[in-house]
Image: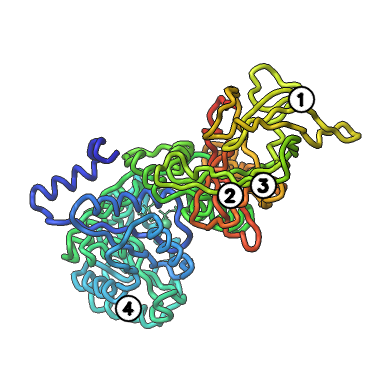
């Protein structure tokens, strides 16, 4: 697909930069804040940044933006590393903004020495008040004219812990009347007596985002620093700081955030879902997190394909979850092992069968010529799906009914002769006969049937639990609805099936296996499978969200 499409705007910029000789190779970075697990939006950013340096000479760094000591945790760092690798990307350098705290401190000192930064004792309310509004300029306060010497002394005292949180800040000295509010003497350092997950108690002052991000880019000689649209107003400050500090001229480029419908993407909201037990952790298969999608059985190939198809844009739109599912289905169709599992059984007795068990060879995946076959036992007592039988079928019902015939997948044609009921009138058993000459692959019976059913042999079958998932929210864009986004959670997003019978080959299911349960959808083993089998439904065989769902034989 990448060969066919035209270049996106970033690729155009990069090709020009390489052609003009501005750069011989490029450097990008993926800069997550370790305050949550990565979601699908991050996946688009990862695919973009790492994808560019796969396509063009250069490399990508993974850099944790860990300048806020309070929210960041090692658990998140580890999960982010795992997710990037699982998606199939390798970073050149693993960095933390906190690696640069010494250097950033020196940068701040340099600004002070150039008369371009000052220590301000105002409260945050005063600072906000003095800042003006988009239509009114801000005002200079008495701290703005402090001497370089005084600023150096105070800034060092801030660093040495002399002042409590909030007592002072360091601000860049730009222009309190600037049309861009972010240029009105932005705060670049604040006091925070807090333990940092990597630097411990070494620091009690921490750089603000705007004073860490661009500077970290420069230190790493990032050529193309790609971020989302809300950072457009920050670009002016990004450029100003680089110019005044006389450091490597990284450039910032913006693209639109990618969000999926029927879910929420912000880490803050996802954290609420986890903390308030609406889901079973960050990796709940209904979560739009990368770890959730992995647990649900999505593949990195499918996610990369999705990101490539949606490309990048300058305008925000909600992406269709069903397109992501389409990509998942496309990939799984190629790689999934076919297996038979009966979700809601009804017993079939083959009255003309001898007592023996016949081992049939049934192919693992007709879409993959290199795949093999597994043995499936066939016997005189089978389960089929209850919904595959109707006592009084409508026209064009091609499944089983009294007097009707169907093929059992990979086995024989059977005919339903008799329906057995209990005293209450419930169907308990179907008595059938099989056609010995109709064995799949060697069918000389001359009988044509329209329906093929999946089945298992009762005695050899194994039991399993199945978890079916629906969308987590009932509305397309929960974040834009009135009130709490959580009031739009779909109460039926998880359905458990416990009376499930699977063919014995599934006894050896591995976590990395991907399965197609015939006529049911794609499934994978869940991490809760210890001593028992639990399968997650990854995605259906067809788009279940399409307006008209075809239910057929
Ligand atoms: P959130 O609001 O979900 O917490 P964030 O932007 O605060 O997201 P970061 O960890 O700061 O998350 O983001 C790391 C990188 O991922 C940034 O470059 C950011 O622009 C990008 N990113 C985050 N969310 C999306 C999204 N929905 N679409 C595209 N890129 C995103
Ligand atoms: Mg953030």
- What's the residue at 31%, 39% (across, down)? 314
- Residue for badge 1: 391
Crowding at mark 3 (Cα within 10 Å: few <14, some 14-19, many 20+): some
- What's the residue at 46%, 77% (across, down)? 195
Q: First in sequence, mark 2 or 3: give its number.
A: 3
User: Looking at the picture, how far across and down is residue 502, in whole percent?
Assistant: 64, 48
Question: Helix, strand or loop at disc 2?
Answer: strand
- Residue for badge 3: 357
- In the image, 4 versus 172, the foreground residue is 4
Q: Say above or below: 115 vs 236.
A: below
- Quadrant of res 423: top right
Front: mark 2 or 3:
3
Q: Is residue 33 shown left or right of residue 483?
A: left
Front: mark 1 or 4:
1
User: Looking at the picture, how far across and down is residue 308, in whole percent?
Assistant: 33, 42
Q: Is mark 3 within 8 Å of ligand 1?
A: no
Q: Say above or below: 12 vs 290.
A: above
- Residue for badge 4: 154
Q: First in sequence, mark 1 or 4: give its number.
A: 4
């Amino acid at each position: 697909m990448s060969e066919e499409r035209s270049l996106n705007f970033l690729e155009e910029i990069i090709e020009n930069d390489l052609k003009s000789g501005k750069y011989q190779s490029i450097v990008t970075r993926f800069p997550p804040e370790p305050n949550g697990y990565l979601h699908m939006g991050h996946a688009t950013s990862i695919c973009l940044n790492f994808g560019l340096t796969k396509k063009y000479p250069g490399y990508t760094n993974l850099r944790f933006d860990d300048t806020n000591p309070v929210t960041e945790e090692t658990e998140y760092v580890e999960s982010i590393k795992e997710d990037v690798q699982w998606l199939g990307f390798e970073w050149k350098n693993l960095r933390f903004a906190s690696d640069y705290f010494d250097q950033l401190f020196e940068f701040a000192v340099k600004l002070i020495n150039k008369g371009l930064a000052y220590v301000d004792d105002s409260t945050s309310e005063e600072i906000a008040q003095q800042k003006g509004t988009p239509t009114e300029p801000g005002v200079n306060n008495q701290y703005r004219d402090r001497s370089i010497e005084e600023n150096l002394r105070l800034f060092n005292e801030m660093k040495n812990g002399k002042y409590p949180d909030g007592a002072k800040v360091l601000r860049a000295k730009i222009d309190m009347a600037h049309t861009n509010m972010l240029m009105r003497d932005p705060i670049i350092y604040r006091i925070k007596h807090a333990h940092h997950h990597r630097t411990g108690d070494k620091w009690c002052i921490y750089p603000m985002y705007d004073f860490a991000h661009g500077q970290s880019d420069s230190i790493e000689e990032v050529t193309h620093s790609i971020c989302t649209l809300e950072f457009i107003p920050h670009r002016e400050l990004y450029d100003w700081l680089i110019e005044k500090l006389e450091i490597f001229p990284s450039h910032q480029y913006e693209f639109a955030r990618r969000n999926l419908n029927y879910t929420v993407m912000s880490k803050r909201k996802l954290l609420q879902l986890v903390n308030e037990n609406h889901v079973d952790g960050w990796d709940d298969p209904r979560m739009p997190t990368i770890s959730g999608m992995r647990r649900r059985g999505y593949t990195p190939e499918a996610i990369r394909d999705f990101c490539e198809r949606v490309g990048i844009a300058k305008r925000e739109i909600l992406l269709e979850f069903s397109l992501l599912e389409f990509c998942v289905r496309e990939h799984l169709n190629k790689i999934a092992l076919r297996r038979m599992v009966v979700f809601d059984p009804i017993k079939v007795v083959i009255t003309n069968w001898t007592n023996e068990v016949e081992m049939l060879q049934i192919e693992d995946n007709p879409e993959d010529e290199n795949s093999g076959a597994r043995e499936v036992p066939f016997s005189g007592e089978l389960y089929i799906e209850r919904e595959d039988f109707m006592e009084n079928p409508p026209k064009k019902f091609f499944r089983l009914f009294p007097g009707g015939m169907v093929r059992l997948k990979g086995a024989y044609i059977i005919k339903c002769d008799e329906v057995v009921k209990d005293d209450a009138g419930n169907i308990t058993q179907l008595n059938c006969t099989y056609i010995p000459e109709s064995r799949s692959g060697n069918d000389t019976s001359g009988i044509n049937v329209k329906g093929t059913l999946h089945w298992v042999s009762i005695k050899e079958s194994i039991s399993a639990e199945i978890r079916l998932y629906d969308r987590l929210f009932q509305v397309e864009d929960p974040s834009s609805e009135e009130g709490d986004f959580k009031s739009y959670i779909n109460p039926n997003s998880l359905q458990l099936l416990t009376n499930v019978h699977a063919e014995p080959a599934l006894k050896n299911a591995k976590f990395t296996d991907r399965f197609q349960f015939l006529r049911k959808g794609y499934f994978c083993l869940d991490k809760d499978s210890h001593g028992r089998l639990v399968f997650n439904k990854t995605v259906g065989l067809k788009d279940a969200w399409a307006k008209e769902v075809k239910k057929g034989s």
